[in-house]
Image: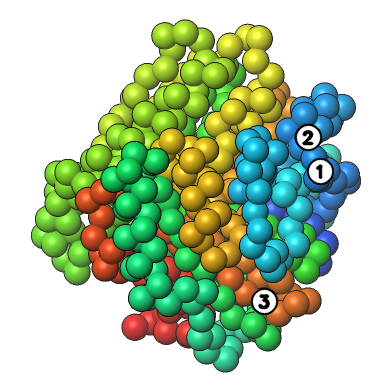
Amino acid sequence: MEQTTFSIESIDVFKKKALVWAQSFSVFCALDSNEYTQDPYAQFEFVLAVDALDTFSATSNSFEQLEAYRQQKASYLFGYLGYDLKNEIEDLQTTHTDTFDFPDMYFFEPRYILQIDKKNKLSINRNYPEAFAIYEMIQSMPLDMPTAQNAIELQSKITREAYLEKIKRIQQHIIEGDIYELNFCRELYATEIELHPLAIYFQLNDTAKAPFSSFFKINEQYILCASPERFLQKKGNQLLSQPIKGTVKRGESMEEDAFLQSELYHSEKERAENIMIVDLVRNDLTHFAETGSIQVKELFGIYTFNTVHHMISSITATLKDTTKYVQAIKKAFPMGSMTGAPKIRAMQLIDTYEESKRGVFSGSIGYFTPENDFDFNVVIRTILYHQKNKYLSIQSGGAITHDSIPEAEWNELNLKSAVIQKILKGKTHE
């Protein structure tokens, strides 16, 4: 692929101007690492894939069709995997209403790929005259985004009282031995909403600075994602999964921050949640990893983000030569951090107790390279917006275990959605 390279003076300004330029296209996807220094596995700082030369979506046998499509397209593909692909992988179904009508799986081959590496060098997949014209066009883009909007008050699909009661019922399943842990989610939504998706994303991204952020536009449907979590990465024959289980707020001072980090690290409940998901991920990897290659590189790592601290573990493995890499993704999907353990029974109970279809939420956004490497996030801390239907949604969840305190779980949901709610209410400076 032909490349032209440029130096960037202000990375943050260029990223924003590049997204403004991309707005005129029907389809584009931006992936942003936000200069996060605690991820040694990041392949780039920022990549923007713009304009679909070709698209792929499927409604059945999706992973097999994607594998065949990849064999035809030895190029970059950007896209997402929706949570409800689980219904193809296992004998499951979802009865909740689909408010967004996103395909369960969607990928596109971009015309333009702009990438900023870790040394702040920009490359554009065009020869110099065309690349320079794109570069100049982006540099000339205005950044006068709308700053005022009507405050958006979100409604909950489930009341606090009903949520607490469902937690108790889920815990009864744990007592009876059905499951060990279940990720239970709640949707907040608003109807008849008109907003400027890119302006909202700029606020969200500036606030969260998450390492797996994404802005995805498919015609009138938008995904505004500020995810801190990696689902699965392949580089050569090496695989990496980094599940998150364990969350605590940021402190008001360095001393309080250190105290909260220590409290999170030593929490028996958070450690129990984390290790159950680590075991689940290890089990998923056994389906396609070389025998003896699975290693827990880091257990109970405490990672700091702009708004929260998280407990993250890192699991690596070597992919078997006989395994098709898309099938490896299928065997690990959906990610254990968003289901629970055992996975199949947990997903059945999720469909029973949750009030909304997850769709893209708790799925994964990412890319394939021409060399068939890939990197995919976990779609959390995300706004879904359908511009034509004027429907906006965010979902958040937490791991329910035997030791969970229902009221504390409700508070954790509110902590995870707090940044987005403040932005939508126009209270980001509070």
Q: Which residue is mark 2?
A: 61
- Name the residue at 25% across, 40% down: 272
The answer to whether 70 appears left or right of 45 in the picture is: right
Q: Residues within 10 Å of mark 2 (few under 14, many from 20)?
A: few
The answer to whether 102 appears left or right of 197 in the picture is: right
Say which label, 1 or 3, has the lower sequence index: 1
At which x and y percent is residue 208? 43, 62
Disc 1 vs disc 3: Cβ atoms closer than 8 Å? Answer: no
At which x and y percent is residue 8? 59, 52
Q: Indicate the amino acid at tag 2.
A: Asn
Which numbered tag is attached to residue 391?
A: 3
Q: Indicate the amino acid at tag 3.
A: Tyr
- Name the residue at 14% across, 51% down: 263
Quarter of the image with the N terminus is top right
Q: Residues within 10 Å of mark 3 (few under 14, many from 20)?
A: some
Frontmost of labels 2 and 3 is 2
